[in-house]
Amino acid sequence: MSWNSDSLKLLKVLEGFYRPCGGEVLRLAKIARLNKLYLAYLRMVRGPLRDELVREEARYRWFIENMIEVVEALRRLNYALYKFRRPVEHVSVDLDILVDRNGIPRAVATLREHGFRVVVSEPYTVTLERRGFIVDLYTEPSFAWVVYMNGGRLLRDHVEEVEVNSVKMQALTREAEVAVAAAHAIYKEHIVLLIDCLTMWSWLNRKAWSIATDFGVETALKELMKTCDLIKSGLLEAPCKVKPHVILKAYVEKTVKDPVFRATLPNVLNYVASRKTAGRDILNRLTRKSY
């Protein structure tokens, strides 16, 4: 085990067992931001980055206030917060919500009444924006118009009521979020973040395994486990890019076992053809450090 790993140092900071000093404070702050753990890190370090903590806390309050307004607007619909629940509070770049396919028109119309505008409308996702706050409405977890999990079944079988700032709302169960985090990291983003590992380490149990198997994403969960084990051993730094042969193996197994994935896979060609910036987008995905 390498105790010089910045990922391990960051984990120790979050656990309260390590206090960075000097230039290490800013270096770990950069890594925490890439791993979507910036707020949690700033809360532990506090003093040296107090002004930054004040700004990030304000961003978190702004995000939660907007989120509450959105879920209150959608309360009468069949929806669930998606990729939202994590073991630590964090500021996301957008709000992801699973919505029943039949409810999408009403959801879009309702959010428009609240000042949102449609930015992108795609087969399985509608993106809306208002003053910098972005909402992605999903009917199916997907990438490039390829479906890798059944959104309708997630809504039907793996949703529970949660409370945020004393407001009740619908969200995926913790166990479902483990399966979703693994599938999202391996199939869509091809990058494992430390927040993905924390989600798995905190909430992985038999039920989470059962959900992953039931939705055909157990290969993704296994690969997430392997990667997170290497990070925890100090052999990899996070964010960690998933190796091409691992992605290919996951896609091949998913194609063989999942008829919906197999049927929607050709959509990738239409997706690429529909984008004028396809070449630049591919280059960005190959060179990015996080998402």
Image (cartoon, rainbow, N blue to C red):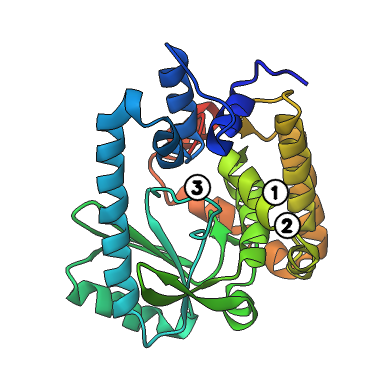
- Marks 1 & 2, CB-CB < 8 Å contact: yes
The answer to whether residue 239 is visible is: no
Which amino acid type is shown beneath numbered disc 2?
A: Leu
Q: CA distance from mark 3 to mark 2?
A: 35 Å
Task: Write down the quadrant of residue 56 in the picture.
Answer: top left
Q: Which residue is mark 3?
A: 272
Residue beneath label 2, please? 204
Say which residue appears at 43% left-offset and 27% top-offset: 29
Figure quadrant of the N terminus: top right
Mark seen at residue 201: 1
Please name whichever residue, 63 or 283, is drawn nearer the observer in this view of the structure: 63
Camera-side mark, 1 or 3: 1
Q: The residue under label 1 is which amino acid type?
A: Trp
Q: Residue at 50% across / 53% down in the picture?
A: 271
Q: Position of residue 260 (x, y in %)?
A: 69, 69
Q: CA distance from mark 1 to mark 3?
A: 35 Å
